Amino acid sequence: VTTHEVGKLLVVDDDGVSRAVLQNLLEMQGHSVEVARDGTEGLARARQEKFDLILLDLLMPGMDGHEVVETLKADPDLRGVSVVMISSVEDMKEVVKCVKLGADDYIFKPFDEVLLKTRVDSCLERRRLRERAMEK
Amino acid sequence: VLGGQDLLPADAASSPAASVPKPFSGRVLVVEDNLINQEVAVNLLAELGLETDVAGNGIEAIELVERTPYAVVLMDCQMPEMDGYEATAEIRKREKGRKRTPIVAMTAHALAGDRERCLAAGMDDYISKPIRLEALQRVFRTWMAAPAAQPEAAEEPKAPEEPALRVDMDRLRRVSRDDDGVRRMVGIFLEESRGRFVELQEAVAAKDAGRAGRAAHTLGGASGNLGFLSLAAGMRELEERCRRGDLTGADERVARLVSELERLKEFLKGQIQEGAGGQS
């Protein structure tokens, strides 16, 4: 019996290990997970189908996480999706910029399983409450 | 009648000869598939005044040990066809009831669990690669001084001289789900790290600290995520230096990290084989 929200998640990261680790950990928590290997592919996937949450790497070649958040939040169809930034501790300043742009939360590499679960759960919970409030 | 004994020198056979330093003598078998490593070992042994035979694989080693009484066998653990663990087990099986040949493992990695694995396979001691003269001297002092009298439980092998490879196997298993997952994850890591290491080497050669730092950053992140602790720490240190624009000694650091990756590969190969063996 799952006591937490399960959702449809998208992982966007250029590092294959990071994608595989996140996919494993999140699937073990009951979520359905898809992956994209860069910002452009991530945005394309997000336009194809509706995700509850995107885990987005900050530093990627080509379109980086910052640009992806900017694009997502400027698009009326995509604005509602929750975003959790993936970064290392050293890139805190960049993460803050992304949060200002509308990212919901962040998680550091290497991933701590407990923090990952907590962050994802609370994002999905917030989203559910928000949607319920909008229905009323 | 017994008076003549007084004229004899002190009984040489019962004196503690082991405590008297003496040059090593005897024939040593080196079991090693890599030609360069073979040559290194033979040269070092010649320096110690020892005669050496070389076997290129485990099967050859078993045959040679049957024919020749070796003072010590130096056994590489990772070899194609038949590895050092299997070869040792076979040698132990065949020599049952006869004199036990001291077998010393040469391992590329230096983990606590490694020692147990070597001892469990029937080896008596181990040294880490690259092999050094001092390590050989220690081993020969232990195993040539009183080769026949050594019981099963030998003296504790000394801690390896190299900085230990640190791997959090629990972490690797947790993020990989199961044995198949571990195999897959290690495959992804090795596949991706190949290109990133090339990138890192090129960037350092081109004195491009920014590019080198980014490559080290990604490699460090991936290593950390999979519990490859010592590799992750080395990458973080390199990344930090690159951030400060400091590339002094960076090529040496990268070379060390490359050999660290090699040790990690060997170690993971062993772990994965072990996991597969446990299932069958």
Image (spheres, rainbow, N blue to C red):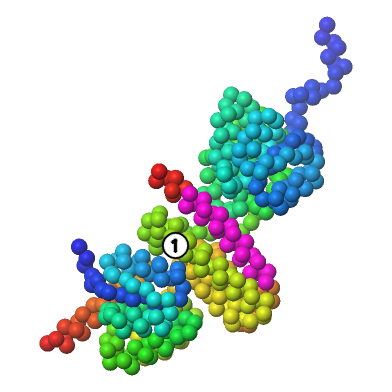
The image quadrant that residue A54 belongs to is: bottom left
* Secondary structure category for the residue under label 1: helix
| Residue at figure coordinates x 75%, y 40% from the top left | B52
Q: Quadrant of the N terminus of chain A?
A: bottom left
Residue B99, by quadrant, is top right
Up-down relation of residue A38 to residue B103 (above or below): below
| In this view, B280 is above or below B111 | above
Nearer to me, A105 or B96: B96
Q: Is residue A112 magenta?
A: no
> Is residue B252 shown in magenta?
yes
**Start and end of the magenta stretch?**
B251-273
The type of residue carrying mark 1 is Met
Q: Which residue is mark 1?
A: B185
The single residue placed furthest to the right in the displayed view is B7
Chain of the residue that carries numbered disc 1 in the rendered image: B
In percent of width and height, residue B51 lies at 77, 38
Q: Main secondary structure of the magenta part?
A: helix
In front: B68, or B160?
B68
Residue B204: horizontal and vertical position, in percent? Answer: 65, 76
Q: Position of residue B44 (x, y in %)?
A: 76, 48
